[in-house]
Image (cartoon, grey):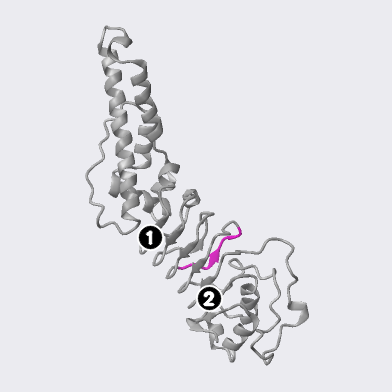
Amino acid sequence: MKAHAQPGNFSCWFWNAIQAATGFTPEVVDEVKHSHHVSYEIPERRLDEVTWTDQAQLMNLKDHLGEHLTHLKELNQERQKTENSRAPPSDYLSRKKHQLVVDRVKATRPSLSFIYNFFEELNCQKCKIQTLDSSLTQFHQLKQISLTGNQIQVLKNLPDNLEIVNACGNQIAEVDDLSPNAQLRHIGLSFNKMASLCNIAPGNTMSFSHPRPDQSSTFPALPPEQIPSSPSTSPYLPALISLDVGFNDLCDLQSTLQDLGSLPNLIVAVLQGNPIALLPRYREAVICHLPKLQKLDDVDIT
């Protein structure tokens, strides 16, 4: 069974959505890409109620696919004229006209990657997605994706240029290495099963022992042996300014602070709903050890 046909994975959801909107499937894309004898027609579909992506983008994609089919038919008609005519080719179709039709076919020829790169935003909420397969990495233009309310257990295969990911209300207990996702600005993972942030923020890249300039040192600093050394490499997730991991299973405050401290530009954090938020002086501890933080648990830090 092909990957896109496996129920519960991202590819299956995406191609079901594309087929519902345009009638295209990966098999149809392959057919029109390699064959000049295509009788396929794009069915009429209402796109005004589409919520999983931008309607204008989807309409542009549909128009492009339709344009390619039109050029294919035109080329097929010209070739049929050639086959049915006894006259030399120059008598019924100039080489220039024929080449123009061929160029149009080549210019509008679709591919899977072409379709993937058509989208900058995807809304996959409550779509019964269980697995984020490798096809997601091919969405090189994707800036924002919502995966809220699915059954995902591992957050992985995020496109390199992604800026915003919301995957709240899943079953996520594991996050793959995010170091390729340097453009990420917000990660939403509330209401999952995260027991550690070590895969989101490997807490060994910066020291956070110094209190905020406007705070007294009443909360004890970490012991020297537990303070990580300064990094010699590029910062981890340098664009990340917002992280929501509320209502997970974070129980170790010290480890959580160490992990969060490795995010150099984090200014908004949501940790409420975790066991660590029940600890005495929890808020003071977080504020003390994350001096750049401006908002914690939806409350401004003043």
- Tell me what residue is drawn at x 50 percent, y 67 percent: 186
Q: Quadrant of residue 292?
A: bottom right
Using the image, determine if residue 207 lies above or below residue 5. below
Residue 178 is inside the magenta segment: yes
Whole-percent x, y for residue 160 in the image? 54, 54
Residue stretch rendered in magenta on the structure: 171-179
Whole-percent x, y for residue 184 in the image? 53, 62
Q: Which mark is residue 230?
A: none
Using the image, determine if residue 47 lies above or below residue 34. below
Observer-nearest residue: 111 or 151? 111
Residue 82 located left or right of residue 287: left
Chief SS of the magenta region: loop
- Tell me what residue is drawn at x 49 percent, y 77 percent: 246
- Tell me what residue is drawn at x 25 percent, y 57 percent: 49
Residue 81 located left or right of residue 167: left
- Tell me what residue is drawn at x 64 percent, y 67 percent: 202
Q: Residue furthest right?
A: 225
Secondary structure type for disc 1: loop
Q: Are marks 2 and 1 in contact (CB under 8 Å)?
A: no
Q: Classify mark 1: residues with Cα within 10 Å, few (<14), some (14-19) or many (20+).
A: many
Q: Amino acid at mark 2?
A: Val
Observer-nearest residue: 130 or 45? 45
Q: Quadrant of the C terminus?
A: bottom right
**Mark 1 sits on what residue?**
124
Observer-nearest residue: 274 or 87? 87
Whole-percent x, y for residue 10 in the image? 42, 54
What is the count of numbered marks? 2
Cα distance between the residues tagged 2 and 1: 25 Å
Task: Please report whichever mark, 2 or 1, sits nearer to the chain's N-terminal start.
Answer: 1
Observer-nearest residue: 60 or 149? 60
**Mark 2 sits on what residue?**
268
